[in-house]
Amino acid sequence: MKKIILQIFTLLLFIGSLSSQNNLPPGQYTSTDKKALKHFEEARKYYDARQDKKAEELLLKAIDADPKFMEPHMILAILCAEQNRLKERIYHLKQATEKAPTMHVQNYFDLGDTEFYVEDYVNAKTHLNQFLKFQRIDPNMKEEAEFILKCVDFAENAKKNPKKITFSNMGTAINSPMAEYFPSIVGDESKFYYTRRLDSPNGSSRYQEDLYVAQKDAKGNWMMSNPIQELSSGGNEGAPSISADGKYMFITVSQEIDGLYLGGQAKGLGSCDIFFTQKINGKWTKPANLGSKINSAMWESQPSFSSDGKTLYFVRGTPMRSGAVKDIDIYYSTVGEDGKFGPAVKLPDNVNSKKEEQSVFIHPDNQTLYFCSKGHVGMGGADIFMSKRKADGNWGDPINLGYPINSSKDENSLLVSPSGKLAYFASDREGGSGELDLYQFEVPEEFKPEKITFARGKIYNAETKEPLEASFELIDLATGQNITRSYSGSNGEFLVTLTANKNYIVNVNKAGFLFYSDNFSLKGKVTDFNKPFLLDIPLQPIDTGNVVELKNVFFDVNKWDLKPESKAELDKLISFLASNLSVKIQLSGHTDSDGDKKANLALSANRAKAVFDYIVSSGKIQSTRLSFKGYGDTKPKVPNNSPENKALNRRTEFKVTGI
């Protein structure tokens, strides 16, 4: 339940003024009735002592003694707000404004704000506009009143034009009488991770947060979730961000509660830090703190790692003595060429508002950012928003997801599945299992991310068929931009998400093996998310005589000028040669059987020389390690008896001539 905006500083000033008045001169209050004043003074003492029930009884007696007495209604309005008795709060604020229309004008503000929260938009407008008509009002409250009026207009329109959405509770396999929130899901949507808040095992007033995981059965239903035992310290761990292949995860750890994580050796840097863990042989490794580029003496939480393996999004705020956190904004950190995270940078002001942002989630399309905010115009409190990355790389202005995704309550923890079909979020709406439950709904078309699919593959030794652990990357062929960087597990298998309707290069590297490169196209193809693109990747050991086809080196017809999209492939070849200083290679060009044989031989030689020249021009590889030759159509891979086969025979290769 979100807090009503109370403008606490003005109320504290009011209560403080009451505390200083031991001997009340005539006219100090709106009442001069001695009995009413006596009850009020006694009520004030009980209020200061936080004995709210007794304070309320005496405040009502003060009103009975003098029905025109305004100040007791103000204190009662505060008590009702603290206890979420909002209709009673509205009644007492109305009484206060009627009995003293020009005294404590912030009552109009609080009245309009509360009416906005309970969706009484007509009266909210009336009272907020009345507040704005007063002279010399606090500038901050004036700005806030104007903001709420914009929210009222938005909420009215959103309620009149609701999105057609049906929410489904995820059921007892996921939810419990406790609170569940901050979900995360793997690329093929077969495993679901989330946070559950439990009672403290030692009986203290503090709660405990643990990580849970559920997986689907053969029919696609969620099986009963289980805690991740190796990541449970007895303290607080939560807000998981799982990689598409389910092999690594970023989590939040509360150092304030845990002290030392899992009996580890290094304390966190702040009250909450972000940690990293990998799954090896079916078990999660001991989490490691991400260090000072991500974590600080502040409060860092709610990580979301991009599918390209480059950028970590998270939130950072200032912890307070009360245990609350203020000034929460969204930050990001990018992995550099050295494989380490760079300094954290705050997202721009069109995303981060003057108020609080949380629950950041970057979709696997790496183009769509979802987050919740209290500072952008919405239904009230924390609403869920979406921002799309523009062509220039900047984030577009946030779009409110509207009603009923957002409401007058706080909404957070939004996760949109990789397929873009379903969204998951936490809510305390009626009909749940207990506290916060996880719900799902179909994403309206206008709020969907870019369409993606996923690729599943296996990397293995071409000679022995043994599975290999190896690093690989996928590159957008049109832009040369690295789309994702990851690795295969000990079984050689990997899974990555991909944006549909694009052409890709796949590069694989492993010490002791020749680098592998291929390309595949999703352009113009109908992609079924339930049927992944399959990649079979054999790696050849570095050995004399072994040949690698450079499948991503391109030339125009009958020309030998390298096309720009060849650069990514050749740069990988340069990196391979720079890492294997003893390797020597011969570059070879090949054509099909069409046309003049002499011309084909010359064309193939010129193409091989173009690759030779590009490598030498990098200044990183000595020309003595390279040679080139054109073979024309003398070494076909397949018979030149069809257009498809002829395309296969037109190729550029390199052969290992020395190690």
Image (spheres, helix red, strand yellow):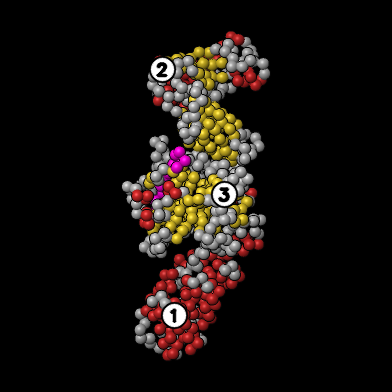
Residue 70 screen position, x and y as percent: 48, 82
User: Dot 1 surroundings within 10 Å: few (below 14), some, or many (20 or more)?
Assistant: many
Look at discs 1 and 3 and give the one toward the viewer: 3
Judging by the rendered image, the residue that carries numbered circle 3 is: 223
Whether residues under marks 2 and 3 lie with C-beta atoms below 8 angstroms apart, the answer is no
- Which amino acid, by three-letter code, is at mark 1? Ala
Quadrant of residue 390 within the rendered picture:
top right
Residue at image position (54%, 16%) is 589
Say the numbered circle drawn on residue 55. Answer: 1
The answer, for residue 481, to whether it is visible in the render is no
Relative vertical location of residue 418 with respect to residue 654 in this rendering, above or below = below
- Which amino acid, by three-letter code, is at mark 2? Ile
Residue 273 screen position, x and y as percent: 39, 51
Q: Main secondary structure of the magenta part?
A: strand
Look at discs 2 and 3 and give the one toward the viewer: 3
The answer, for residue 190, to whether it is visible in the render is yes
Say the numbered circle drawn on residue 659. Answer: 2
Residue at image position (59%, 45%) is 217
| Mark pair 1, 3: CA separation | 51 Å
